[in-house]
Image (cartoon, rainbow, N blue to C red):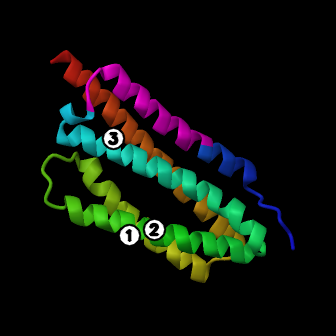
Amino acid sequence: MELVVHSTDTLAVIASVAIAIAGFSGVVVALTGRTADSFGAVEKLNFRILLQVSALALFFALVPLISHRAFEPPLAWRISMILYGAVHLFDAGFFVLRTRDSTTLSPLQRVAPRIGVVIAVMQLLLVVLGNTIVIEVGYLLVLLWHLAIAGLGFANLVFASRATDRE
């Protein structure tokens, strides 16, 4: 059984970046000198997005490394992508339903979960239609998508904190 994951270094970097983004959010919150109860609804949402998506990226950066220990690479990538796609579809779909009537979200925050649903469906289609290389590349691209969303949550949290400090 071949235990080689061609993207091991990339997955490790993605996991590290996810940890760093989540960690920096704690620093931002600590530097504001405010308690979580004093955050507004938008700040709480940005913090939740940041932590949740960072955790998602971290967890799913590690899944292929673990699944390759138990399965041949083609099957390991398919199992990893099925798990990731299912969780992503549930998460993005829930977020779309929960925030569809929200007036406090920016246009980007309204569109991103809808794009996430489309990406999750594409993840699941790749399992059926793609070969191992396509699945692996798609998996990495979705992880990068989640890092970008976490980064957006981080930027929103920083700018919201700075705006609150000015007031």
Tag 1–tag 2 contact (CB < 8 Å): yes
Q: Residue at x 37, y 34 (%)?
A: 155
Q: Name the disc covering residue 47, or none.
A: 3
Magenta region: 16-35
Tell me, yes or no, if residue 126 can be seen here.
Answer: yes
Q: Residue 102: horizontal and vertical position, in percent?
A: 15, 54
Give the residue at x 73% y 55%: 7
Nearer-N-terminus badge (1/3) = 3
Outermost residue on the bottom side: it is 128
Tell me which corner region of the image, top left, top right, bottom left or bottom right, holds residue 158: top left
Relative height, residue 34 to residue 65 (above, below): above
Secondary structure of the residue carrying numbered label 3:
helix
Separation (CA) of disc 1 from disc 2: 5 Å
Quarter that holds the N terminus? bottom right
Q: Residue furthest top?
A: 166
Mark 2 residue element: helix
Could you tell me which quadrant the C terminus lies in?
A: top left
Question: Amino acid type of disc 1?
Answer: Phe
Query: Is 17 a magenta residue?
Result: yes
**Residue at mark 2:** 87
Q: Give the side of residue 109 with respect to residue 55, left or right.
A: left
